[in-house]
Image (cartoon, helix red, strand yellow):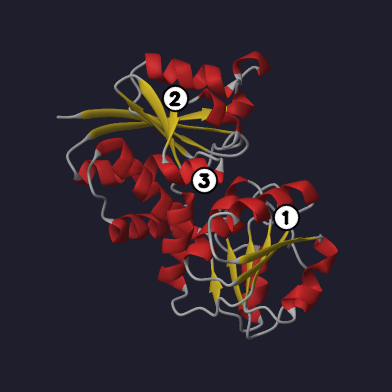
Amino acid sequence: MERCLVGLIGAGIGTSLSPALHEREAGRHGLRYLYQLVDLDRLAPAARDVGDLVSAARRLGFRGLNITHPVKQDVVRHLDDLAPEAAELGAVNTVVFDHGRAVGHNTDRYGFAAGLARQLPGLRLDHVVQLGAGGAGLAVACALAGAGARRLSVADVDPGRAERLARAIAGHHPVTVEAIAPEEVPARLADAGGLVNATPIGMEGHPGTPIEPEHLRADLWVADVIYRPLETALIRTARALGCRVADGGGMVVHQAAASFQLFTGYAPGEDRMYADFLELVGDA
């Protein structure tokens, strides 16, 4: 039976569903698959360098690694090569060890696009307001541009980060991308068709909503990248107002499926993995 050792490097990942999602799908393909969590918060400060951790995983025979907050961008300089989507985004969420080389990929863009299409088909994409321009925000903006968005207004607490995202996306896609200040978001929402939250606000440990509820309206679609909890305060409020909503479950499942295929070479059953996800969330 083929063996496969993979892992996840990130901070505060103790409740991650990635091990169960990957290992359940691996079992259906007859693989002996171990998915190991490497939680930066549980390591001594001297042991948290992502480059050292990637090197150690390569020496220990890992097939690959998933990478999450806060090191999706930091890990790039420690890799031997980048796949095109990772190079475009400047962020990596999947590292594959291939004949001794560490190659970075990014499956977040595919994950968000596939999850949005699953939960909210037929969206109005003429103007979308996005909150957050970090690693996840880059992937989300790229996915929206690839899906046909004509205009993106991107707000971040770090103006420079929003401006860098705008330049990166506009340089690769025929879309108008504008970095805006957080206080400009309500005015931009007035003529937007959709709102995406790509900030940590709403996740476990970061309660609240990234925008005041009075700025939402029933004909606005609302998406969140957060999946723990699956129903964030933003999603709950938007649903109550009559908005079409997409939670973060679709993104986490589809990016996991794409990573699984990179690690193993086996095509995953994405519908099966989504059913697994719903079961796991229900049991949590």
**Precedes in sequence: disc 3 or disc 1:** 3
Q: Residue furthest right?
A: 183
**What is the count of numbered marks?**
3
Identify which amino acid the numbered label 2 is placed on.
Asp
Q: Amino acid under label 3? A: Glu
Q: How far separated are the C-alphas under marks 2 and 1?
A: 38 Å
Query: Circle 1 is placed at which residue position?
Result: 207
Tell me which label, 2 or 1, sits earlier in the chain. Answer: 2
Q: Mark 1: few, some, or many residues within 10 Å (few <14, many ≥20)?
A: few
Residue tagged by mark 2? Answer: 80
Label 3 crowd (10 A; few <14 / some 14-19 / many >=20): some
Q: Nearer the viewer, residue 55 or 206?
A: 55
Q: Is residue 191 above or below residue 270?
A: below
Nearest the eye: 128 or 29: 128
Give SS at disc 3.
helix
Q: Which mark is residue 88?
A: 3
Quarter of the image holding residue 140? Answer: bottom right
Q: Position of residue 111 (x, y in %)?
A: 44, 55
Q: Is residue 97 visible?
A: yes
Amino acid type at mark 1: Pro
Q: Secondary structure at mark 1?
A: loop
Tell whether label 1 touches label 3 (CB within 8 Å).
no
Give residue 179's quadrant in the image.
Answer: bottom right
